[in-house]
Amino acid sequence: MITANELYEAINQFAPFETAMSFDNVGILIGSSETSSDSVLTALDATKSVLEEAVRKNIRMILTHHPVIFEPLRQLREDSIPYLAVKYGLTILSAHTNLDIAPGGVNDTLAECIGVRADQHTDEECTLIGTLDRPMDAVTFAGQIKERLRLRGLRFTDTKKELHRVLVACGAGGGSIGLAVKCGADALVTGEIKHHQIGFANDHGIAVFDLGHFQSEDMIIPVLTERLNRLFPGTAFIRAESDTDGVYYI
């Protein structure tokens, strides 16, 4: 059995909530700090399917990466996620950019998975700069990313040169392309990048690897779930089976 406040304090030890970006919204966002549960559902997003799974499994607490409330609410419709969470009596915690930049957090986990050794963290932009385990061209690196993350596909550009230095920016990290130039990176790996940012990268000889937002962060959930199960052996932390982005590939 664990309370929401105990879970908050545990996460605060390895991913301090005060380190979240100023635009972010993290912590206990719905429900009471006194809510207690013998199991916690973990997910990247608090979708309707995830809420319904919690109810179906009689779980009162959900831990997500993306904030269940991000922007100020101007209305509260009966089909909205916050409304449904309250209706179902759920307490929801979210650890977002504080988890992105934490040691062993999202960026570190993504970099390790794709074969990038982190040299420097640039927390003000939620990124890290690192070196590939071995130099390779863009096509080979794209294949390595796809295989290691078990992706169904990804977008990438090819500068026709050997890649050494890589800027890793999980989630919507396309805005970090200027930092990639400044850091002397050969490549940017991220989950979201805009058309004009790809053009900027092309102009500066930087290969871009766009994994998809969900796919660039999804690997942290099993890592986080396992870590919390070790910290709280009396509580079952369970990865939500319904936690997907609903995207299909043909």
Image (cartoon, grey):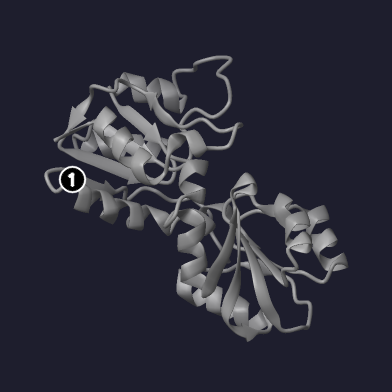
Q: Amino acid at mark 1?
A: Phe
Residue 245 % position (x, y): 49, 50
Residue 231 % position (x, y): 21, 48
Residue 41 % position (x, y): 28, 42
**244, above or below 10, in the image:** below
Q: Along the line of sight, which residue is nearer the eye, 237 or 88?
A: 237
- For the point 66% across and 81% down, the residue is 139
- For the point 32% across and 34% down, the residue is 8
Which quadrant: the N terminus?
top left
Left/right of residue 14 with respect to residue 34 in the rendered view: right
Q: Along the line of sight, which residue is nearer the eye, 157 or 14?
A: 14
> In the current view of this chain or complex, which residue is farthest to the front?
120
Left/right of residue 26 with respect to residue 12 in the rendered view: right
Instruction: Specify whether residue 231 is in view.
Output: yes
**174, above or below 56, in the image:** below
Helix, strand or loop at label 1? It is loop
- For the point 52% across and 66% down, the residue is 111
Q: Quadrant of residue 40?
A: top left
Instruction: Specify whether residue 150 is in view.
Output: no
Which quadrant: the C terminus?
bottom right
Q: Which residue is mark 1?
A: 232
Q: Residues within 10 Å of mark 1 (few under 14, many from 20)?
A: some
> In the current view of this chain or complex, which residue is farthest to the right?
203
Left/right of residue 152 with respect to residue 156 in the rendered view: left
Q: Along the line of sight, which residue is nearer the eye, 75 or 199?
A: 199
